[in-house]
């Protein structure tokens, strides 16, 4: 979020515009936690299945 905020403000400055805060302050802390948990679950569940299965089976299901 910090990188995006810095990037957006520099992009706005480069084109001579002052971008409003509503453009970069989209996510609240209450929204970030479920997104983080969901992202980890989406990444780890298939990875765990692939690690437990045979290589040929994992590659065929790709």
Image (cartoon, helix red, strand yellow):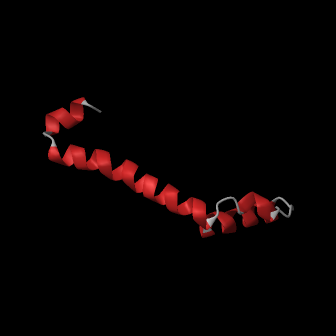
Depicted 39 relative to depicted 53: above or below: below
Q: Residue furthest left?
A: 54
**Spot occupied by residue 58 in the image (x, y as percentages of width and height):** 21, 37
The image quadrant that residue 40 belongs to is bottom left
Quadrant where the image shows the C terminus: top left
Q: Residue at x 26, y 31 (%)?
A: 61
Q: Nearer the viewer, residue 20 or 40?
A: 40
Quadrant the N terminus occupies? bottom right
Q: Is residue 38 above or below residue 4?
A: above
Q: Nearer the viewer, residue 44 or 16?
A: 44
**What residue is drawn where x is 51% and y is 56%?**
35
Q: Which residue is located at x 15 percent, y 41 percent?
A: 53
Q: Position of residue 30 (x, y in %)?
A: 59, 64
Count of numbered tags: 0
Check the image and report above or below for 58 versus 51.
above
The answer to whether residue 2 is left or right of residue 34 is right
Q: Residue 22: horizontal and vertical position, in percent?
A: 78, 60
Residue lying furthest top: 60
Is 33 placed left or right of 41 in the picture? Answer: right
Where's residue 52, x and y in %? 16, 46
3 relative to 16 in the view: left or right: left
Q: Work out whether residue 13 or residue 59 is closer to the camera in this orientation and state it.
A: 59
């Amino acid at each position: 979020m910090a990188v995006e905020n810095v990037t957006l403000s520099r992009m706005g400055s480069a084109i001579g515009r002052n971008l409003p805060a509503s453009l970069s302050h989209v996510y609240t802390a209450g929204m970030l936690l479920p997104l983080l948990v969901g992202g980890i679950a989406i990444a780890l569940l298939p990875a765990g299945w692939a690690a437990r299965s045979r290589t040929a089976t994992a590659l065929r299901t790709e």
